[in-house]
Image: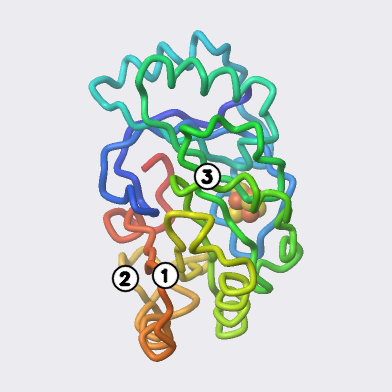
């Protein structure tokens, strides 16, 4: 497998936010979201065997929560899926952060999938969600919409309603997009969509979704990597 980085930090978004977590960041992505904050994953990466990855994870004990992210980790599904099975057998709690564009049916059901649905503001990545992945969702999973503006918000509300997402997934996450060139300040000024505006819309419309802020961008400077 090709890895960009493997490190321990605090989980920054989803319902696991705030928990200690080991991140395994895989190289490569086939999308180009307009607001992507992980462009450094698109190329490069260092080859690792499964044994080497497991050894690095074990060295970060006692943390038992592991998130596979990227880039798009499912581009390396041939190696990733057996590694997931191995770690599950060793009683790790696993998460995968995925764009939702790759098939997810083969991901072990015990893995918590955080699945993006790309909104219009994602630019060329918009409408990349693979509809058959709706059938792969379980109540362990969370569906995330990164929102840049009102059009994205309305798209997300409509998608949730049309596809009865509350019946398929455990959480619906509404996450304001961040500027690609943020200031060093750890403030909401770096968000493309002001979280306060988003909350006001959600309250007005009675939307049953969880506001998801990327807390690592408030704990550390928003451009900091490996956190
Ligand atoms: S899917 Fe993720 S890594 Fe790929 S371009 Fe979009 S935000 Fe960046």
In the image: residue 7, left or right of residue 33: left
Q: Which residue is mark 2?
A: 187
Q: How many marks?
A: 3
Question: Which image quarter is the C terminus in?
Answer: top left
Discs 1/2, front: 1
Q: Which residue is mark 3?
A: 97
In the image: residue 170, left or right of residue 11: right
**Dot 1 lies on which element?**
loop
Q: Which residue is mark 1?
A: 209
Q: Is residue 149 above or below residue 109?
A: below
Task: Kindly identify the residue that appears in the image at 62 percent across and 18 percent down.
Answer: 47
Q: Sequence-wise, which precedes: disc 3 or disc 2?
A: 3
Q: Is residue 64 above or below residue 134?
A: above
Question: Toward the viewer: 219 or 223?
Answer: 219
On the image, the x and y values in percent for residue 30 come to 74, 46
Task: Kindly identify the residue that appears in the image at 47 percent across and 53 percent down.
Answer: 142
**Can you tell me whether the CB of the residue at mark 1 lies under 8 Å from the nearest atom of ligand 1?**
no
Badge 1 crowding class, 10 Å Cα cut-off, few under 14, some 14 to 19, many 20 or more, is: some
Question: Which image quarter is the N terminus in?
Answer: top right
């Amino acid at each position: 497998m090709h890895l960009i980085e493997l490190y321990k930090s605090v989980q920054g978004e989803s319902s696991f936010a705030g928990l200690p977590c080991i991140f395994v960041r895989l190289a490569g992505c086939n999308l180009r979201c307009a607001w992507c904050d992980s462009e450094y994953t698109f190329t490069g990466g260092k080859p690792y065997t499964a044994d080497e990855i497991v050894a690095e994870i074990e060295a970060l004990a006692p943390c038992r929560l592991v998130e596979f992210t990227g880039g798009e980790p499912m581009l390396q599904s041939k190696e990733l899926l057996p590694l997931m099975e191995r770690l599950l057998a060793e009683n790790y709690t696993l998460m995968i952060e995925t764009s939702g564009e790759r098939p997810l049916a083969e991901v072990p059901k015990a893995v918590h999938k955080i699945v993006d649905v790309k909104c219009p503001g994602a630019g060329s990545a918009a409408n990349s969600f693979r509809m058959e992945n709706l059938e792969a969702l379980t109540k362990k999973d969370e569906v995330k919409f990164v929102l840049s503006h009102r059009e994205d918000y309305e798209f997300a509300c409509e998608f949730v309603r049309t596809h009865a997402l509350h019946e398929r997934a455990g959480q619906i996450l509404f996450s304001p997009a961040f500027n690609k060139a943020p200031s060093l300040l750890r403030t909401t000024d770096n968000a493309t969509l002001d979280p306060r505006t988003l909350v006001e819309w959600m309250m007005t419309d009675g939307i049953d979704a969880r506001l998801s802020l990327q807390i690592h961008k408030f704990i550390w400077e928003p451009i900091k990597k490996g956190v």
